[in-house]
Amino acid sequence: MNIFYLLALALAPGAAIGLYIYWKDEHEREPIGLLVKSFFLGAVSTIVTLLISWPINAIIPIDPASVTQQAVHAFILVALIEEFSKFIFVRWVLYPNANFNEPYDGIVYAVTVSLGFAGLENILYVWDGGFEVAVIRMFTAVPAHATFGALMGYFLGIAKFQHKKEHYSFYALGVATLFHGAYDYFWFISYVPGIWVGAIVSLITGIVLSRSAIRIHQQNSPFKPST
């Protein structure tokens, strides 16, 4: 299959989700240049993930047949490391930016960073697995990363704009890690008959909560016209 076709398949779902999040910013949209920067920061976060993961994975072997060890694998070695790698860019690069000036911006920037991560990851998976992998991940892994970002961004929006709520930054990382870990865990132990359904339930739950988070922060925008 043509390399450019595969590249388009790998990036298309993230682009569609990114546009959805952008157009949902009804009151004060973010600068396109800063969103592009956020996307590339997300791609860079994959490198941070690798730098953290390689030495840890070398000293903590995981037995694929152990449901207990796979929980450590999913929640700690994958979810926590990946979400932390995204979090450091959202919290310490984008969060202080003057354009981050309403609660919904937390969702915009966290999702954009997550899509940068998912985009590069998706290119690697699709390059190796081809069209079938691209289609499967279009409806699973890519939207999953977006929901992790939306949940992280929701709590970062609270942390920045509600007085004495800075501890919500830790909730942001924790909730994203929890949903990411649950999603991965059910796939990692998919050798248990029917257990993969848990990953789909986790994804759907994340999507529902993300939509609620978007609606709440839209309603709380200081740029919302008074009625």
Image (cartoon, rainbow, N blue to C red):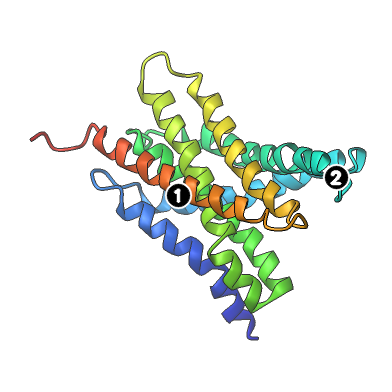
Which amino acid type is shown beneath numbered disc 1?
Ile
Tag nearer the camera, 2 or 1: 2
Please, is residue 173 above or below residue 192 in the view? Answer: above
* Residue 38 at least partly seen: no
The CA span between labels 2 and 1 is 29 Å
Of mark 2 and mark 1, the one earlier in the sequence is 2
Q: Residue at x 35, y 33 (%)?
A: 103
Is residue 216 in view from this perspective?
A: yes
Numbered circle sitting on residue 7: none
Which part of the image, by quadrant, shows the N terminus? bottom right
Location of mark 1 (residue): 207
Q: Position of residue 168 (x, y in %)?
A: 48, 23
200 versus 28 height, above or below = below
Name the secondary structure under disc 2: loop
Q: Residue 11 occupies which quadrant of the picture?
A: bottom right
Answer few, some or many: residues within 10 Å of disc 2's Cα (few below 14, many 20 plus, some between 14 and 19).
few
| Residue 66 badge | 2
Q: Amino acid at mark 2?
A: Ser
Sort mark 1 into few (<14), some (14-19) or many (20+) by Cα contacts within 10 Å. Answer: some
